[in-house]
Amino acid sequence: MKLPIVQYPRIVAENLAHFAPVFETPEQRKHFCEYVTGLIAGDKATIAAINGLFLNNNDQSALNKFMSQAQWPEEELNYRRVLYELTRLHRRPVSTSAGRLILDDTLAHHTKCSMEGLAYLRDHSIGRNVWAHNVVTSYYVNRSDQFPVDFRLYHQFSRKYEKRRLHQVQERLRNGATLANYRQYIATLVSQHYRHQLHQPKTRLGTDLVQQAIAWELPFSVVLFDSWFLRWPLVEAIEAVGKDWIGACPKDRLILHKNCWTQLQSYIQTIPAEAYRPYQLGDRCYWVFSKVLTMKNLNRQRVRVVASYENHVKSDKLPRFYATNRKEWEAKRILTTYLDRWPTETFNEDAKGTWALKIISYVSYELSNAIGISPS
């Protein structure tokens, strides 16, 4: 049997003054402290479980209303959290060249319900479609310092599906011009318009996160991302603000070889095993080939492409591909820098239980990191 919580952890109480101006009432500040404490100390990241941790607790509906109905500026709360992190970061000299902004997206699984933004999406890690929120995130790393910056919710909009759905409703209306069918037709039109207005490509969401990091004066020089984000609109936006980038590269990207557009996976098969060079990164050895190539989907820009095998060259398998605008960088530096993406993977796993809730989950993650506890 667990003992009930009778007071907030010191780290929550001491830092409340920094976040308190966001909330209008003492009750809101109380719920904020309860929720953050529950995510740090509790076993389950649910409202009922968190509420049940405290001695003489109120009904869980009060905390639930604070999270789902109360009016408080979550964007300002997140901005204050980032300022809190930057203050800590600048307690010693900070190298902008060592800073990385990492873009990623993750699926927060749910059961089918009416939650806003929920969609039936392909989860490639398990090989099937699931009901989930697709969250695009930005994460900051500077040597041993790291923290999540912000996120954007991706709203799916399939033109093919929407056209088919509207056609079905129109057919029903033609077969029977009833009041119910007219209402369904109007409701479908309004719903499609609303979801179309919400929809933005992931590259645009990623661009927004990069521009936000610039506006908040995060010291970084390189943006890192996985293969899905290697598209010209995002690359163009990153270079427009004077930052470099390294991204994983899909195997089917077209590159210019002997005056012909060839898929990267076909081109790499023409490279002999002797062209690969070994690089020791930590306790692992990578065999790497790199070359500056013209890539069609990046507006025919010349980029350095890196092909990498772990341990040894495998002629029966394709290597992992990476690309960067820094054509003069050697392969080892490119791989070493790209490995700085790893913290965002562990953060996404830790935070998945709280993605459906408000931005407070970011706050709890950082406070729990400070005392060495991973949030549930």
Image: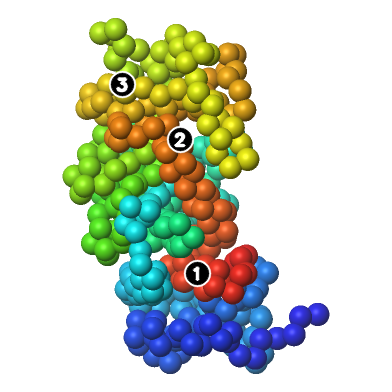
Q: Which residue is at the front of the view, 47 or 77?
A: 77
Task: Identify the residue under disc 1.
Answer: 366
Going by the numbered disc 1, the residue's amino acid type is Glu
Task: Identify the residue under disc 3.
Answer: 293
Dot 2, crowdedness within 10 Å: few (<14), some or many (≥20)?
Answer: some
- Circles 3 and 1 in contact, beta carbons < 8 Å: no
The single residue placed furthest to the left in the displayed view is 240
Above or below for 318 versus 325: above
The residue that appears at 62% across and 69% down in the rendered structure is 373
Residue 215 position by quadrant: bottom left
Q: Which residue is at the front of the view, 75 or 306?
A: 306
Dot 1, crowdedness within 10 Å: few (<14), some or many (≥20)?
Answer: many
* Cα gap from disc 2 to disc 3, whole angstroms: 18 Å
Q: Which residue is at the front of the view, 165 or 234?
A: 234
Going by the numbered disc 2, the residue's amino acid type is Lys
Q: Earlier in the sequence, mark 2 or mark 1?
A: 2
Estimate the x, y position of residue 188 in percent, counting from the top left: 32, 45
The residue that appears at 40% across and 24% down in the rendered structure is 290
Secondary structure of residue under mark 2: helix
Nearer to us of marks 2 and 3 is: 2
Q: Earlier in the sequence, mark 3 or mark 1?
A: 3
Task: Identify the residue under disc 2.
Answer: 332
* Cα gap from disc 2 to disc 1, whole angstroms: 31 Å
Estimate the x, y position of residue 159 in percent, counting from the top left: 32, 34
* Cα gap from disc 3 to disc 1, whole angstroms: 41 Å
Nearer to us of marks 3 and 1 is: 3
The single residue placed furthest to the right in the displayed view is 1
Secondary structure of residue under mark 3: strand
